[in-house]
Amino acid sequence: MHLTNEDKHQYRFETHGPKYLTDGTSNVDMGVVVITTGESHPCHKHTQQEESFLALEGECEVWVDGHLVTLQKGDYLVCKEGEAHFFRNVTDGDFKAVFIKAPRLDFKDSVYIEWEPGEEFPKI
């Protein structure tokens, strides 16, 4: 068993970014992410994991393989392995979501892609 509380974990950038709630003994990586006003998270894909998001607060643009999806509170998005995703918060409030990566891996399988909205999406 693994029991924890979100308040016991730190965001990567003190007040925002991801924070993991799992301890490495689960079959998934799970946590919460906060994307602040005007912030974006670089375009990337996972080679062996799918990553899903449950929006808890706010709204955020998510570009999946170059296609825009707007996540709002209560929305659930699954990015299959190999689907590139880019987050950008263009609202005047923070966006917060639960994220789950499955299966859990002992290594980082993120591949970052040089792309931003407005550019032609590369063939990957």
Image (spheres, rainbow, N blue to C red):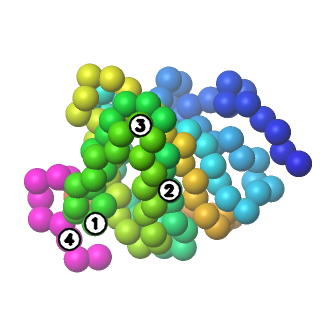
Q: Which residue is mark 4?
A: 122
Which label sits on residue 52? Answer: 2
Q: Quadrant of residue 35?
A: top left
- In front: label 2 or label 1: 2
What crowding class fits label 3: few (fewer than 14 Cα within 10 Å), some (14-19), or many (20 or more)?
Answer: some
What crowding class fits label 2: few (fewer than 14 Cα within 10 Å), some (14-19), or many (20 or more)?
Answer: some
Residue ranking furthest to the bottom: 123
Whether residue 17 is visible, yes or no, is: no
102 up-or-down from 17: above or below: below
Q: Which residue is mark 3?
A: 73
- In front: label 3 or label 4: 3
Q: Position of residue 116 (x, y in %)?
A: 20, 53
104 vs 73, nearest the viewer? 73
Labels 3 and 4: the sequence-earlier one: 3
Dot 3: element: loop
Which label sits on residue 65? Answer: 1
